[in-house]
Image: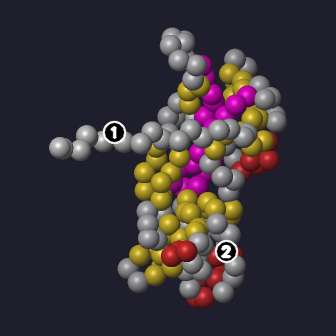
């Protein structure tokens, strides 16, 4: 069996196991840790804030799936990047070098960039990424530089006081 790396990929050929088929040209997540090992493939389920959640438990990959596994196209992680090259859509619509963008994907595994915007109301000091972005060709992955950021912990749910 080939050795899989955790991450997101685009399929180039279908994978069929029992009554389940994952079509070609689909976004998938490969996981190898714990119960997913030696490797499992998961399909995208829900997109929230331009990032996918993947359906578990997924399909366990077998030795017979090696040809399929070798055909996968590994994709950069969803997340935040800066542009190392200007992105020109039209003479009046340009994203400059250094612009902060969010990288996401459609269900076909094609990249989408979402530009960071500061909202006009300025009630809070937040950046906003729209729910629709600009599709990109794979060559644009090489013009993205990953950004490090602090991921704030979610607050604990409120609890009711214990009855006396």
Q: Residue most toward the front?
A: 164
Instruction: Give the quarter of the image for residue 81.
Output: top right
- Rendered view: 22 above or below 18: above
Q: Which numbered circle lies on residue 6?
A: none
The residue under the point 65% across, 81% down is 67
Q: Magenta stretch: residue 104 in it?
A: yes
- Rendered view: 132 above or below 69: above
- Rendered view: 21 above or below 82: below
| CB under 8 Å between discs 2 and 1 | no
The residue under the point 38% across, 79% down is 19
x and y percentages locating residue 15 in the rendered image: 52, 76
For marks 2 and 1, the one nearer the N-term is 2
Q: Magenta stretch: residue 103 in it?
A: yes
Q: Which numbered circle lies on residue 158?
A: 1
Instruction: Give the quarter of the image for residue 155.
Output: top left
x and y percentages locating residue 23 in the rendered image: 50, 68
Q: Which residue does the numbered mark 2 point to in the structure image?
A: 4
Q: Start and end of the magenta stretch? A: 99-118
- Of the pair 27 and 92, the residue shown nearer to us: 27
Chief SS of the magenta region: strand
x and y percentages locating residue 75 in the rendered image: 68, 57
- Of the pair 139 and 119, the residue shown nearer to us: 119
Mark whose residue sits in front, 2 or 1: 1
| Placement of the C terminus among the 4 image quadrants | top left
x and y percentages locating residue 29 in the rendered image: 56, 63
Report the side of 84 relative to 61 (left or right): right
Q: How many C-alpha atoms fall within 10 Å of the one at disc 1: few (<14), some, or many (≥20)? A: few
């Amino acid at each position: 069996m080939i050795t899989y790396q955790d991450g997101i990929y685009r399929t180039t050929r279908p994978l069929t196991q029992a009554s389940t088929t994952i079509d070609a040209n689909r976004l998938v997540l490969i996981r190898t840790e714990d119960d997913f090992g030696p490797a499992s493939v998961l399909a995208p389920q829900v997109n929230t804030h331009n990032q996918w959640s993947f359906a578990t438990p997924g399909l366990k990959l077998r030795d017979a799936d090696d040809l399929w596994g070798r055909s996968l196209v590994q994709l950069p992680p969803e997340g935040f990047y800066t542009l190392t090259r200007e992105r020109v859509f039209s003479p009046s619509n340009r994203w400059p070098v250094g612009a902060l963008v969010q990288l996401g994907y459609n269900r076909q595994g094609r990249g989408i960039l979402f530009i960071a915007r500061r909202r006009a109301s300025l009630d809070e000091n937040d950046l906003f990424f729209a729910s629709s972005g600009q599709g990109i060709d794979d060559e644009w992955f090489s013009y993205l530089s990953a950004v490090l950021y602090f991921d704030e912990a979610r607050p604990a749910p409120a609890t009711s006081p214990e009855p006396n």
